[in-house]
């Protein structure tokens, strides 16, 4: 289950980075989240941070399972 959450974390982090980058470098957010939600750039940074945390948590489960 943790490995799956790591993969979900990667997707979430990518969507957060795309949304933030689109708002900073273009006039609209990139990725899929802007099609469903109207979020400010700080929210996209938070989404990227949550995705990164999920990825780290999922990868720590993989390393603990090998030992």
Image (cartoon, helix red, strand yellow):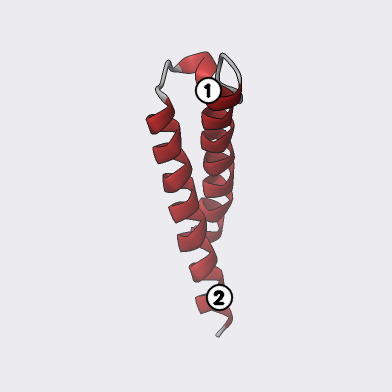
Comparing 28 with 16, the one in front is 28
Q: Position of residue 60 (x, y in %)?
A: 49, 69
The residue lying at 54 percent from left, 65 percent from top is 59
Q: Earlier in the sequence, mark 1 or mark 2?
A: 1
The residue lying at 52 percent from left, 40 percent from top is 12
- Which corner quadrant of the image does residue 18 belong to? top right
Q: Residues within 10 Å of mark 2 (few under 14, many from 20)?
A: few
Q: Residues within 10 Å of mark 1 (few under 14, many from 20)?
A: some
Left or right: where 67 falls relative to 41: right
The residue lying at 39 percent from left, 39 percent from top is 46
- Mark 1 → mark 2, Cα distance in angstroms: 36 Å
Q: Position of residue 56 (x, y in %)?
A: 49, 61
Residue position marked by numbered label 1 in the rendering: 23
- Which corner quadrant of the image does residue 11 belong to? top right
Q: Position of residue 64 (x, y in %)?
A: 50, 77
Q: Residue furthest bottom?
A: 67
Q: Position of residue 13 (x, y in %)?
A: 53, 43
Instruction: Specify the quadrant that holds the C terminus.
Output: bottom right
The residue lying at 58 percent from left, 50 percent from top is 7
Q: Secondary structure at mark 1?
A: helix
Up the image or down, 29 lies above or below 61; here it is above
Residue position marked by numbered label 2 in the rendering: 63
């Amino acid at each position: 289950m943790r490995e799956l959450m790591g993969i979900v974390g990667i997707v979430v982090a990518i969507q957060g980075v795309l949304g933030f980058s689109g708002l900073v470098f273009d006039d609209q957010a990139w990725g899929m989240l802007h099609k469903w939600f109207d979020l400010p750039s700080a929210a996209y940074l938070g989404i990227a941070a949550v995705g990164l945390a999920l990825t780290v948590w999922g990868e720590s489960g993989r390393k603990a399972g090998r030992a």
